[in-house]
Image (cartoon, grey):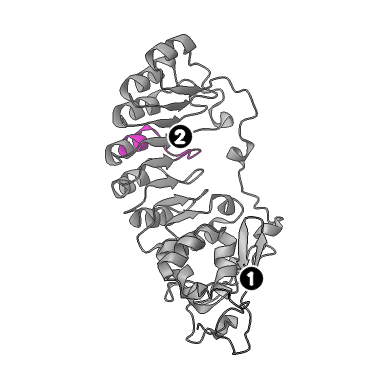
């Protein structure tokens, strides 16, 4: 491929100036001309969606005007996974990024992964745009039973839900989820051992799951204070269950022979913890670290879709230590903001 460079698994297409001006890619004699910037936005969006978040927001918009417009379209944002990114930044910064990306999805959002949401308003915003949402991961978020009862009806399309380490949710919230999310086949409700250490058994969440989530195939409830009886109730009620995480559920006693005979398709992990339990699952993230070079992005080329809400660049209060995020609104007609070459 003349003019292309392979870096790892990524092919970089180099745009160069031909002798006839900025009308395309420089070609060797006899090679086929490929108008990469003339692909329809839908196709470009699907391609770009496979790239890392940093590349989509920082690199692609600088290539040419048509690519920048594609990044603004919904096909790039049907799946939004900023879980790792959000664990390193302050809640207000995460909220603004999340709102921008969800607005770009244009109602086509199918998967959302983000951690540590603190404001009920942004969680409600997610629910308001969850019409097509199937996978929702919100670990370590500030979600209460009251909030769950308010938004559960908007999550009816969700099939997989992660509410691990959401300490304000109880059986009441899980029951509301089960009654409203009828398509739910997977739920993660892991706790941390420091949160449950020394406390008495509490089976109410297990019973709520058994009573309202009969279609579950995947259930994680590590370090829950549950008994053998409540777990057996889950197994009896959730007949399609294929995976059950019971790591750290020390009061549960299930014999391997019994499980093999009664539930041959079921894989049970735990209660014994054979390795260090996912240290990253309990990073409090309260002392936000910014030492990673990979996260030192300069978003000078990005912009908000909602011009009325975000007219101004972020001030000092919106800056991350050692990292300045600027989201500019819109694209000018000739693409001059980034020095784009005109599209052929």
* Residue at screen point 30% across, 50% down: 154
* Residue at screen point 42% across, 46% down: 136
Q: Is residue 181 magenta?
A: no
At label 1, counting other C-alpha atoms closer than 10 Å, the crowd grade (few under 14, some 14-19, many 20 or more) is few
Q: Secondary structure at mark 2?
A: loop
Looking at the image, residue 214 lies above or below residue 3? above
Looking at the image, residue 318 lies above or below residue 20? above
Q: Is residue 173 magenta?
A: yes
Residue 122 locus on image (x, y percent): 43, 56
* Residue at screen point 64% across, 72% down: 3
Bounds of the magenta span? Answer: 163-176
Q: Between residue 115 and residue 21, name the one nearer to us.
A: 21
Q: Which mark is residue 2?
A: 1
| Horizontal arrangement in the rendering, residue 203 relative to residue 290 (left or right) | left
Residue 255 visible? no
If the image is split into quadrants, where does the N terminus sit? bottom right
Residue 33 locus on image (x, y percent): 53, 76
Q: Which mark is residue 117?
A: none
Looking at the image, residue 228 lies above or below residue 164? above
Residue 278 visible? yes
């Amino acid at each position: 491929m003349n003019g292309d460079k392979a870096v790892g698994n990524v092919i970089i297409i180099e745009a160069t100036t031909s002798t006839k001006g900025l009308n395309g890619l420089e070609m060797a004699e006899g090679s086929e001309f490929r108008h990469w910037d003339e692909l329809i936005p839908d196709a470009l969006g699907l391609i770009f969606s496979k790239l890392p978040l940093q590349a989509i927001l920082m690199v692609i918009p600088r290539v040419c005007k048509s690519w920048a417009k594609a990044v603004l379209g919904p096909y790039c944002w049907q799946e939004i996974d900023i879980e790792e990114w959000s664990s390193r930044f302050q809640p207000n910064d995460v909220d603004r990024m999340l709102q921008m990306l969800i607005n770009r999805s244009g109602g086509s959002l199918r998967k959302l992964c983000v951690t540590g949401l603190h404001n009920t308003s942004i969680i409600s915003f997610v629910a308001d745009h969850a019409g097509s949402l199937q996978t929702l991961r919100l670990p370590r978020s500030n979600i209460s039973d009251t909030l769950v009862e308010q938004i559960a009806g908007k999550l009816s399309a969700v099939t997989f839900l992660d509410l691990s380490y959401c300490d304000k949710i109880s059986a009441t919230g899980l029951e509301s989820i089960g009654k409203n999310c009828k398509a739910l086949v997977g739920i993660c409700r892991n706790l941390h051992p420091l949160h449950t250490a020394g406390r008495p058994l509490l089976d109410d969440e297990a019973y709520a799951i058994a009573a309202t989530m009969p279609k579950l195939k995947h259930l994680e409830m590590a370090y829950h204070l549950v008994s053998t009886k409540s777990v057996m109730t889950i197994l009896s009620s959730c007949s399609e269950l294929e995976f059950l995480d019971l790591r750290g559920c020390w009061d549960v006693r299930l014999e391997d022979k019994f499980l093999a005979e009664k539930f041959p398709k079921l894989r049970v992990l735990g209660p014994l913890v054979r390795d260090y339990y996912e240290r990253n699952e309990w990073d409090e993230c309260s002392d936000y670290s910014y030492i990673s070079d990979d996260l030192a992005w300069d978003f000078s080329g990005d912009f908000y879709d909602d011009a009325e809400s975000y007219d101004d660049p972020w001030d000092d209060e919106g800056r991350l230590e050692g990292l300045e995020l600027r989201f500019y609104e819109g694209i000018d007609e000739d693409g001059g903001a980034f020095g784009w070459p005109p599209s052929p």
